[in-house]
Amino acid sequence: MNSASGNVLRVRGISKSFGGVHAVNDVSFDVQEGEVLGLIGPNGSGKSTLFDCILGQLTPDTGEVYVGGEAVAGKRPCDLNKLGIARTFQMLQVFPEMTVLENIILAGQEHHGGMLSRLFGKRDAGLTEEADEMIAFFRLSHLRDQRAGSLSYGQQKLLDVAMAFMAGPRLVMLDEPAGGVNLTMLESLKEHLKVFNEERGATFVVIEHNMEFVMALCSRILVLSNGAIIAEGTPEEIRNDPDVIEAYLGA
């Protein structure tokens, strides 16, 4: 087990209630550098609320979030972005009227240079070569100059993930990356994420309803039920945990 210094993300005692309903209740966990962590649970278990508390979309009632040792709870998503935290959403965040290349470049521009360099520098911020490498990695080169809105849903999902990785983030939070993706594209997405983790040391936290996708991708899994963590372990341990089975059967 790595020490705290090896943790990209530390979550301590996060709670969030809405009208007396405890959506997240005293949740704590760490994410280690280079880890692929899965976060699963039945509908209404608090996964999305927890994600939003970590990423600045919501302010937790109690608790703290640390990125590289810095307390960040309550910070805006753009501030977290500057600290190297990227995310994808359940709803695609691509710009449909822009090309694949333009989407990738735009995703990288927020992390390269200040306002003056954007105003007076190259139109592409010098990112075309890097963007083309990212496009090639996700096997989207044949779609490079097509409008994102003309792509299939699965292709747009790949583009969305590529945009999240364009800035070379320390941590990527993936919110249901498998949702609505056909089996062929899903297998491609899984393999690309594995390669990114193994070859580039990328760190992921994945919320996902597709259990097989999580089991095949993640090295460690947390299970949320009624806003609290009820189990933690390897995919095999989670698959056979009676509390997890009961939580899903009773959901």
Image (cartoon, grey):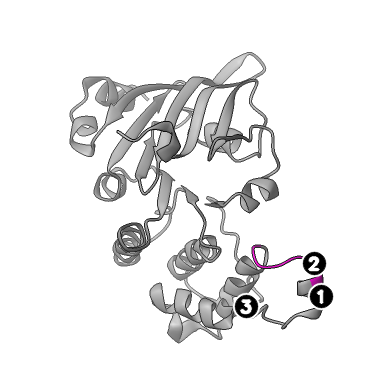
Is residue 88 shown to the viewer in this render?
Answer: no
Residue 114 highlighted magenta (yes or no): yes
Q: Residue 119 carries which label?
A: 1
Q: Identify the element where label 2 is drawn.
A: helix
Q: Quote the CA–CA distance across marks 3 and 2.
A: 19 Å
> Which quarter shows the N terminus?
top left
Q: Identify the element where label 1 is drawn.
A: helix
Residue carrying label 3: 102
- State the predominant SS element of the stretch in magenta: loop
Q: In this image, 27 relative to 108: left or right?
A: left
User: Residue at image x 49%, y 32%?
Assistant: 10
Most foreground residue, 74 or 1: 1
Q: In this image, 35 relative to 59: left or right?
A: left
Q: In this image, 53 relative to 44: left or right?
A: right
- Mark 3 nearby-residue class (10 Å; few <14, some 14–19, many ≥20): many
Residue 129 highlighted magenta (yes or no): no
Residue 227 x, y percent position in the rendering: 48, 22
Give above or below for 218 relative to 247: below
Residue 66: quarter of image: top right
User: Residue at image x 60%, y 33%?
Assistant: 53
Residue 136 x, y percent position in the rendering: 42, 79
Q: Which mark is residue 115?
A: 2
Give above or below for 44 relative to 103: above
Q: Which mark is residue 212?
A: none
Please state the extent of the stretch shown in magenta in the rendering.
111-116
Kindly identify the amino acid type of the residue bearing the numbered disc 1: Leu
Is residue 198 shown to the viewer in this render?
Answer: yes
Most foreground residue, 98 or 170: 170
- Mark 1 nearby-residue class (10 Å; few <14, some 14–19, many ≥20): few
Residue 62: quarter of image: top right
Kindly identify the amino acid type of the residue bearing the numbered disc 3: Glu
